[in-house]
Image (cartoon, rainbow, N blue to C red):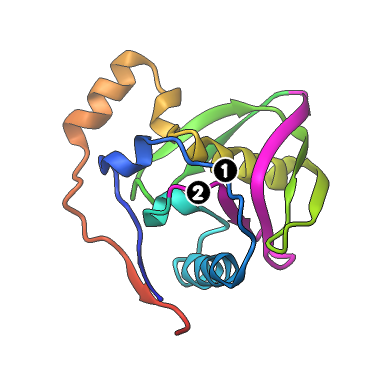
Amino acid sequence: MELTIRIYPDHVLREKSKPVSTFDERLQKIATSMTEFMQRLDGIGLAAPQIGILERIIVVDIGRGPLYIVNPEIIKSKGKEIFEEGCLSIPGASVQIKRPFLIEIRGCDIEGKEIHIKAKDLLARVIQHEIDHLQGKLIIDFLSKEALLKFNMNYNPTLPAFQVRGRE
């Protein structure tokens, strides 16, 4: 499966994803391809909208192996910390973002089994970042109006999109 990352200002990145209702071989293939793609780009998180699939699927790997979460929902959060975030869909951009450092989420694995995850620090941050993508929210949405205007004046969306061929 060949994947191409969507680059801002691609309109797909602003659309809300639909919940997944069918847990089948297609979903597993998407998740596996997303993981391979993310790893080849040296990413630690990827949401399905970033590859043009408007479904609530994220994959995260902060060095402990891939974590697949389908239909993720944050049910609790605690604390706040500021940290710089980048995004594969906005090459070269980084934004200081204040987020909870402890979260509890529920969702499903790629086989449809309900899962509950307590995450902290980097894992919590990456999950929240990817869930933002499912809502059509990007890191630049955390900028002030003035900073966003400056960003848009200087941003070059003609940078080449990344393409990686996944497993067939």
Give the quarter of the image for residue 101: top right
Q: Quadrant of the C terminus?
A: bottom left
* Residue that numbered label 1 is attached to: 19
Q: Residues within 10 Å of mark 1 (few under 14, many from 20)?
A: some
For residue 63: magenta? yes
Q: Do callouts 1 and 2 mark residues in contact (Cβ within 8 Å)?
A: yes
Tell me which secondary structure the magenta stretch mostly adopts: strand
Horizontally, is 24 left or right of 77 in the view? left
Q: How many numbered circles does the render carry?
A: 2
Residues rendered magenta in the picture? 54-79
Comes first in the chain, label 1 or label 2: 1
Mark pair 1, 2: CA separation: 6 Å
Question: What numbered label is drawn on residue 55?
Answer: 2
Q: Write the residue at 40% across / 22% down.
A: 143
Magenta span contains residue 37: no
Going by the image, does 32 lie left or right of 81? Answer: left
Q: Residue at x 57, y 52 (%)?
A: 57
Task: Tell me residue 5's x, y (percent).
Answer: 35, 58
Q: Amino acid at mark 1?
A: Pro
